[in-house]
Image (tube, grey):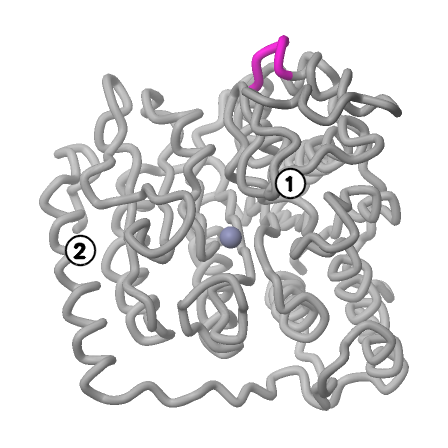
Amino acid sequence: MVLCALVYSDSYQGYELSPSHPMKPARLMLTYELMRAYGLFDGGVAVIEPRAATEDELALVHDRDYIAKVRELSQPGAPAGAGAGWGLGTGDNPIFPRMHEASALIAGASITAAAWVMKESPGHAFNMAGGLHHALSNKASGFCVYNDAAIAIAWLKKHYGARALYLDFDAHHGDGVQYAFEADPDVLTVSFHESGMYLFPGTGFTNERGRGAGSGYAVNLPLPPGSADGELIEAFDALVPPLARAFRPDIIVTQDGCDAHWSDPLSHLALTLAGYRALFERQQRLAHELTGGRWLALGGGGYQAYTSVPRIWTILLEVMAGRKLDDTLPEEWRRLCARFEAGAVPRRLNEDDSPEAPVAESERVRASVRRSVDEIISGVPAELRAAL
Ligand SMILES: [Zn+2]
C-alpha cells in the first residue's frame, strides 16, 4: 500500500496575481473538486492542511531584503512603482493584496509535503499550488514570488541531509531552481522545456551544466516547438533513469506543470494526456526503484486552466495513489467546470483530440531532440556517466 497525501488549502485562492492574469487559482479548486468527486480522498489519499513557511525557511533561498520588500508591498496602499528592481509590479508579476502571505503559504505547503514524504515509507505527496520555479533569490519572475521548489529542496538538505533529484517538465525552463543549486553536487536538476529560443525565460540550453563543484549537476533538454509524447518519452528514457541511478538520490522532486500540453495557450509543445500519464508512471517507478518511494510532486504552469489542468493533475494523483479511475467524468464536476469554462467541458478523463503533426515536422523535431540528448550525454561527468 502506497501512502499518498495531497497538501491543499482553500487559501491557495489568495495567490491571484490579478483578476485577468493567466495563472488562475480557480484551476486548483477545480482540480481538488475533480479529485474529490472521483473519491480519491475516501480512504486513499490523505488531505493535509499546509502551514506557511517561516521567514528563516524562505531565507534558505531568498535574500532577506527581498523578503522584506515582498512583505512591504503586500500592505494596502503600496505605491505602484515600488517593486521596480525586484521583479514586482510588472505585467507578469503584479503586486497583489497579501502577496507575502499567499506566497509563503505555497512555500510552506511544499515543505509540509516534503516533511510528510520523509516520514512515510513509501510516501508520495503532491502540492499542486507549488512548482513556482522561476523565482530568483532576489527577484520575482514568471508569475513566481517565492521559489517553493528550491525552498523545499534546501529544507530537505538542511533537515535530512538529503540528496535530491529535481525533474522539471513544465513548458518553461526551471531556471530559478537550477540557479539555486548550480554549484551543488547534492542536487541534480533536470529540466525538459520548450527551447529558450522560442519561450520565456530564454535559458536552459544543453551547455548550461552547473558550475564549480556542481559542474555536470544541471541538465537541460530544450525542446523545439511541436515536440510531443514520443520525443519526450524517448529522451526521458535515454537520460533520466541512467542519471538517476548513478546519482542515487534520497528523494525525487518533480515539477509537473501542465503547460506542455498541446492545448496550452502559452507554449508550443504538444504533449497529450496519455503522454503526461506515461511521464507520471515513470516518475513513480523511479521513486520506487531508487528512493524507497520518496516522491514530492509539485504543480507549475497550466493555462488551459479549467479543462486540461484539472484532468492532468487528477491523472497524476491517480498514478501516485495506484488507483484506476473511471474514464467518465463525474457529472457534478462537469456542472461546476461549466461555470468557469466558456467552451465545451470534456466528458471523459482521458479524452484528448490532439491535432496530428505532419510527418516531416515530427521527423525534424525528433532529430533535433536526439541531437540535444547526445550533446547532454557527451557533457555528463564521469561519476554520473556509469550507466549512460
Ligand atoms: Zn510554465
Give the main secondary structure of the magenta stretch.
helix
Q: Residue at x 18, y 49 (%)?
A: 387
Farthest-out residue, left: 378
- Please identify the quarter of the rendering in which residue 225 is found: bottom left
* SS at circle 2: helix
* SS at circle 1: helix
- Please say if 153 is above or below 364: above
- Please say if 208 is above or below 53: below
Q: Is residue 64 magenta?
A: yes
Q: Residue at x 90, y 81 (%)?
A: 332
- Please identify the quarter of the rendering in which residue 59 is found: top right
| Mark 2 surroundings: few (<14), some (14-19) or many (≥20) residues within 10 A | many
Of 273 and 93, nearer the camera is: 93
Of 212 and 294, nearer the camera is: 212
Q: Please tell me which of labels 2 and 1 falls first in the chain.
A: 1
Q: Which mark is residue 372?
A: 2
What is the x, y in percent for residue 280? 51, 64
What is the x, y in percent for residue 62? 57, 18
Q: Is residue 214 magenta?
A: no
Q: Which residues are magenta?
A: 62-66
Report the amino acid beneath label 2.
Ser
Q: Which mark is residue 117?
A: 1
What is the x, y in percent for residue 231? 29, 70
Q: Residue at x 30, y 36 (%)?
A: 218
Q: Residue at x 74, y 52 (%)?
A: 6
Report the amino acid beneath label 1.
Val
- Please say if 1 is above or below 8: below
Which is in the foreground here, disc 2 or disc 1?
A: 2
